[in-house]
Amino acid sequence: MRTFVRDLVLVVVVAFAPMAAVTIATPAVSSAECATGEFWDPKANECRAQGGPLAQQCDPGQWWDPTGNVCRPLGVGPQPLACAAGEWWDPTANVCRPLGVGPQPLACDNGWWWDPTANVCRPPLIPPAG
């Protein structure tokens, strides 16, 4: 019985040793292959469109408002525009739009989806099979 347990422990150690070596030797993923025209944002852990606003380093008690690309005190949000009668304020683009007209989606490539908050095309959430 003692030799069986010793042999079983040896088999388990031999089976798990390569996995432990790979875990120790390879670092965690800190980047990704982004599409053309995009870059990796490690803080947000996602690909972002070139030319889009980068998150600012705000002081304690403030948050970054990507709509205005400014730091705001906690509890203070974007300031709506004074839109004319018959228009509404679209905070994602910070523009006044006619009533009944919503944000205009981009013509994204097949499989990509339009992110209305950043007004960019994003890659598929589930990679295509193949």
Image (cartoon, grey):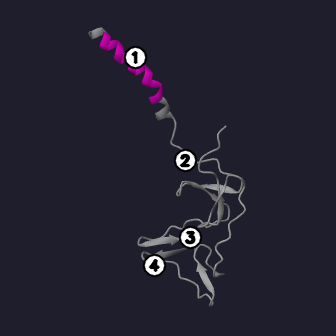
Q: Are marks 1 and 3 in contact (CB under 8 Å)?
A: no
Residue kind at label 3, given as amino acid type: Pro
Q: Which residues are magenta?
A: 4-20
Q: Is residue 12 magenta?
A: yes
> In the rendered image, which quarter is residue 75 located in?
bottom left
Residue under numbered circle 3: 66
Q: Secondary structure at mark 3?
A: loop
Image location of residue 85, percent across then percent down: 62, 90
Rendered-image quadrant of the C terminus: top right
Image location of residue 5, percent across then percent down: 30, 14
Q: Secondary structure at mark 1?
A: helix
Residue under numbered circle 1: 11
Q: Which badge, 2 or 3, is on the more N-terminal residue?
A: 2
Label 1 or label 2, whichever lies nearer to me, is 1
Residue drawn at point x = 30 percent, y = 9 percent: 3
The label shown at residue 30 is: 2
Residue under numbered circle 4: 76
Q: CA distance from mark 1 to mark 2?
A: 34 Å
> In the rendered image, which quarter is residue 99 located in?
bottom right
Residue kind at label 4, given as amino acid type: Val
Q: Main secondary structure of the magenta part?
A: helix
